[in-house]
Amino acid sequence: MGCIGCSCSTGKDSVSGCRSNGGCASGGCNRHNTYDWIAAQGISDPRPFDVVEVSFKNGSRKEFFKNPQHTRATTGDWVVVESASGGFDVGKVSLTGELVRMQMKRKRVRPDARLSQVVRKAHERDVERLDEVRKEERDILIHARAIARSLDLNMKIGDVEFQGDGRKCTFYYTADGRVDFRELIRHYARDFKVKVEMRQIGARQESARIGGLGNCGRELCCSTWLTEFKSVNTAAARYQNLAINQTKLSGMCGRLKCCLNYELDTYIDALEDFPDRAERLKTQAGLAILIKTDVFKRLMFYTYAEDRGKLYPIHVDQIWEAIEMIKSGKLPGSLEDILAMAPALDVEEPEEAEPDFENVHDVIQLPIEKRNKRKKKRSKNRDRSQSAAAAVEKAAQNDALQGKRQGPPPRRNDRPGHQQGGGQGNRPPQGKPNPNRPPQNRPDQKPQGDRPKQDQRPPNPNKNQGGGPQKPKEKPDNNDKNQ
């Protein structure tokens, strides 16, 4: 992503900046851009200053260094500097001369403070080495987060920064409290083979290092120009009549937006003309309560407590007159009477300009477009229910037709296989019959003397109920016949 001061949009986050356009007016595509206008105009400093400001990792970190005369480093040069923890680092000079003196005063750094020195200008091999270690930072960040999670540490690794010579790596993390990361450092030193430094930062500093876009569509203020973070509370939102909604008032860092403080002074000055205790006004028509306030239009919206169907926008001057009337012991009749006390500021509406084209509405008429009527879509559930009901009705009709063709069902005595003494389909007799007892005929039936004796035998209690084959019975003895 290119910066605003140039047309470079290569999309590469490289240490070389906008080399294709010969450099940017703002110092390069980095965070916290600075513009050394004195060096750009070619003006020599009347009082030379031997301290320069060096930017590391695209402006995410800036420090001051002593600049000896033999280095001849100026704004925009890549330099090799001494590291406070040992070794060497590579950065870019962002400011020189009198502007550095002003920056040190702004950041409360004493001019006689002990600072590290600039060793020399960086050559191509130094820049290539820096690009190599910068490419490894993303993979190391992912690995570092996995190790911290495996150790169950209540912390978040936000950013990783390598030193220019690749011997040291700084891990920036955020945590709610103190964290015992001694075991974590051992894992990092063993896996990454570098000197490890852990540095705790806040949530806003983390957003400043990572960067991003806010709800306004612009880059985050903390990553572009804001360097001092002031406390923000919900009172700033209340002064501006904003809804206390945590999701809308929070920024990318999860804290309240810093821009809530930008217009706070303007709102406080405008609220001085509004009465302090005007949330409720007593009228003869009823109690009126304040709903909202438009600060810059100087309007206060009231409604009745019993009937909140209508809002009455009343000017602040009319409210002052109503308060003075209430203090004197007189109650206004209604909110309409308060509106009639003092004329509101009349705003002249701009006259509508006549159109410079000819009105052809009555001359040319377009034909009416014919549209086909769309069929109403029937729901699937309705179609399914109707199809199921039709299937049930059809099955009932088929059953009725089949019953008419076959006739009425036969009675129990007329069913096939039903006989008094045997046959298929008859129920087994209840109780155990006596084989010695001769069969008895019914009084309404004729004696069956002519029938064979085997037909007059009692039914077999052990025969199959389903009408299966029956076992033949043994013939009775002659003694039984004689009896």
Image: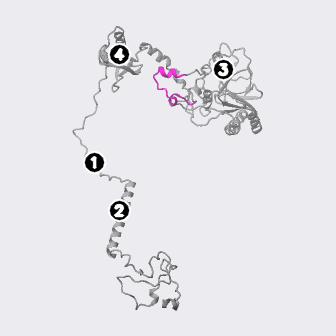
Q: Position of residue 244 (x, y in %)?
A: 49, 26
Q: Position of residue 159 (x, y in %)?
A: 66, 33
Q: Earlier in the sequence, mark 1 or mark 2?
A: 1
* Mark 1 crowd level (few <14, some 14–19, many ≥20, 10 Å Cα): few
Q: CA distance from mark 3 to mark 1?
A: 73 Å
Q: CA distance from mark 4 to mark 2?
A: 71 Å
Q: CA distance from mark 2 to mark 3?
A: 92 Å
Mark 1: which secondary structure?
A: loop
Mark 3: which secondary structure?
A: loop
Q: Earlier in the sequence, mark 3 or mark 1?
A: 3
Q: Which stretch is magenta?
A: 233-252
Between marks 3 and 4 in the image, the one whose residue lies nearer the viewer: 4
Residue in view at x 38 percent, y 78 percent? 413
Residue in view at x 38 percent, y 75 percent? 412
Between marks 1 and 2 in the image, the one whose residue lies nearer the viewer: 2
Between marks 2 and 3 in the image, the one whose residue lies nearer the viewer: 2
Q: Which mark identifies residue 282?
A: 4
Residue indicated by mark 3: 96
The front one of 338 and 387 is 387
Decide: is 169 above or below 301. Answer: below
* Mark 4 crowd level (few <14, some 14–19, many ≥20, 10 Å Cα): some
Between marks 1 and 4 in the image, the one whose residue lies nearer the viewer: 4
* Mark 2 crowd level (few <14, some 14–19, many ≥20, 10 Å Cα): few
Q: Earlier in the sequence, mark 2 or mark 3?
A: 3
Q: CA distance from mark 3 to mark 4?
A: 67 Å
Q: Earlier in the sequence, mark 3 or mark 4?
A: 3
Q: Which mark identifies residue 369?
A: 1
Q: Earlier in the sequence, mark 4 or mark 2?
A: 4
Residue in view at x 35 percent, y 21 percent? 313
Q: Which mark identifies residue 390?
A: 2
Q: Is 250 covered by the magenta stretch? A: yes
